[in-house]
Amino acid sequence: MSEAMSDGDLAAHLAEVAGRILINVRASGLFSPKALGKAGDQTANQFLVHALREVRPEDGLLSEEEKDNPERLAKSRVWIVDPVDGTREYGEERSDWAVHVGMAVDGEAVLGAVALPGLDLTGAGGGTVLRSDQPRPLPPAPEKLRMVVSRTRPAKEAVAVAERLDAELVPMGSAGAKAMAVILGQADIYLHSGGQYEWDSMAPVAVAQAHGLHCSRIDGSPLIYNQEDVYLPDLLICRKEHAEQVLTLISEVQVSA
């Protein structure tokens, strides 16, 4: 059955099940917040990597919690996963954490699912999964823009750009939660310059692009995945109508710094 699933259905199913596993690990009540993050990461990772190797054995695989296998570099299709994006928020029983399951093809983020297990939009329980293959209409942008930033370490470029835009800062946890906040109408701009890795942004970027959002490096260059060096330090996700202005302001802020 799983082998017959489309890649989109598989990504969404894996993200949703991993989210349920993480909720159950947390509900066990056996772990301190710090130990919970590690236990959740490792448990969800084992599920995701074993499942992908079982049902997509020919594809490459990159996971935050797995030793990197350089064989992925020769693959066209590479799954990139983050079992718990926002480990701190997960351990603190907040809702702004995520599970990322995505696939890059020839370096491009083409498919992704981002599960937000702590965010129940329907009232039916079970969290929320946003998918690149099932885009939803974007809510209209408000008059006063909102920029989502780290709740613990807001990037100085983001704060400076927000000031020039007169945008409201919205503190939030994981990268996936921030990116999905733009899709869900909780924010309008996600600007990050504090350092990330491929698994932090690949699935969210695939989902955001499918929803018609602008996604790039903060210098406007494309985001390229499945690289030998998986460090991908900066990211801009926003509505396309705001991209040119934000990129210009980023450049001005960097020059004046």
Image: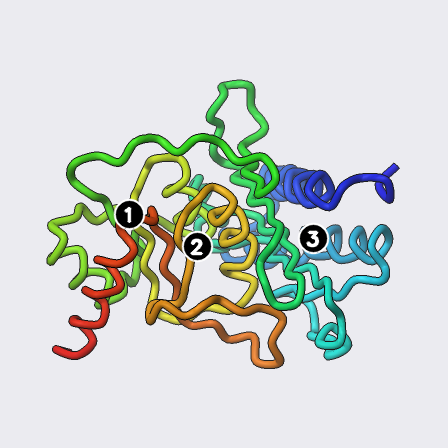
Q: Amino acid at mark 3?
A: Thr
Q: Return the residue at label 3.
A: 43
Measured as percent of width and height from the top left, residue 30 is found at 61, 45
The answer, for residue 28, to whether it is visible in the render is no
Above/below status of 142 relative to 121: below
Element type where label 1 sits in the image: helix
Q: Return the residue at label 1.
A: 241
Q: Could you tell me how far apart the alpha carbons at marks 2 and 1 are, in whole angstroms?
A: 22 Å
Q: Return the residue at label 2.
A: 175
Q: Could you tell me how far apart the alpha carbons at marks 2 and 3 are, in whole angstroms?
A: 21 Å
Residue mark closest to the camera, 3 vs 1: 1
Above/below status of 213 relative to 70: above
Question: Mark 1 or mark 3, which is nearer the start of the sequence?
Answer: 3
Q: Residue at x 18, y 46 (%)?
A: 168
Measured as percent of width and height from the top left, residue 248 is found at 21, 65
User: Are there few (<14), some (14-19), or many (20+) residues within 10 Å of tag 1?
Assistant: few
On the picture, is 191 further left or further right than 144? right
Question: Mark 3 or mark 2, which is nearer the start of the sequence?
Answer: 3
Measured as percent of width and height from the top left, residue 110 is found at 61, 54
Q: Are marks 3 and 1 in contact (CB under 8 Å)?
A: no
